[in-house]
Image (cartoon, rainbow, N blue to C red):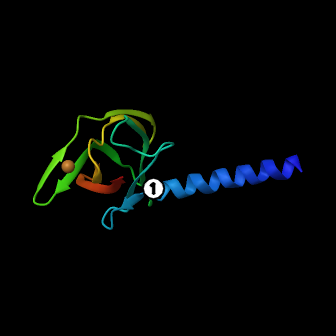
Amino acid sequence: MKVIMMIALILFGQFSFAAAELEGVCSQVTKVCASYETAEPFTTTQEGRFKLLLQSTDQKEVTFVKADLWMQMGTHGHGSSPLKITPVAPGEFDVTKAFFVMKGTWQIRVTFEQDSRRETLIIPVLIK
Ligand SMILES: [Cu+2]
């Protein structure tokens, strides 16, 4: 019985990991996908931390350029303070100092280069 529960835990763990990875977007042009996963939901009052993934679905090399937070409000917009971005593996970054300072729809903007083409992907993040 213990073994069955452990297997169930492992399966559930993988399922939730996979679901978290779906918080992302892909470029139709370069076939590069940017996604994030976070252990704790973001709030307006605490420092947000997440893992940022930048992956080429056709196995081409991708060069990370920058990432930041942005909020579009009507015709105006504003950012937040700079993210602390630490590369931990190819295409994988630990991001801290993510301050979503107000409720609403934020964007994690990820800029990268592939084959000398520069692109920015926008991952929407709803802060409740
Ligand atoms: Cu705002």
Measuring 25% from the left and 54% from the top, which residue is drawn there?
120
Q: Residue at x 86, y 46 (%)?
A: 2
Q: Can the viewer see residue 38 in this picture?
A: yes
Q: Residue 100 at x, y = what percent?
A: 30, 43
Q: Residues within 10 Å of mark 1 (few under 14, many from 20)?
A: few
In percent of width and height, residue 75 lies at 10, 60
Q: Name, please, the residue furthest toward the left.
A: 75
For residue 121, which quarter of the picture? bottom left
Query: Which structural element holds mark 1?
Result: loop
Q: Quadrant of residue 30?
A: bottom left
Counting the numbered discs, the total is 1
The residue nearer to you, when weighing 57 against 7, is 7
Q: Residue at x 32, y 43 (%)?
A: 64
Would residue 114 be visible to someone looking at this image?
Answer: no
| 59 relative to 85 in the view: left or right | right
Residue 3, percent from left and from top: 86, 48
Please state which of residues 116 and 71 is positioned toward the viewer in this rendering.
71
Mark 1 C-beta to ligand 1 under 8 Å = no
Q: Residue furthest toward the bottom? A: 28
Q: Is residue 121 left or right of residue 33?
A: left
Q: Which residue is mark 1?
A: 59
Residue 46 or residue 52, whichever sits in front: 46
Q: Nearer the viewer, residue 64 or 74?
A: 74
List x then y, in percent, for residue 17.
57, 51
Q: Amino acid at mark 1?
A: Gln
The residue sitting at 22% across, 39% down in the picture is 80
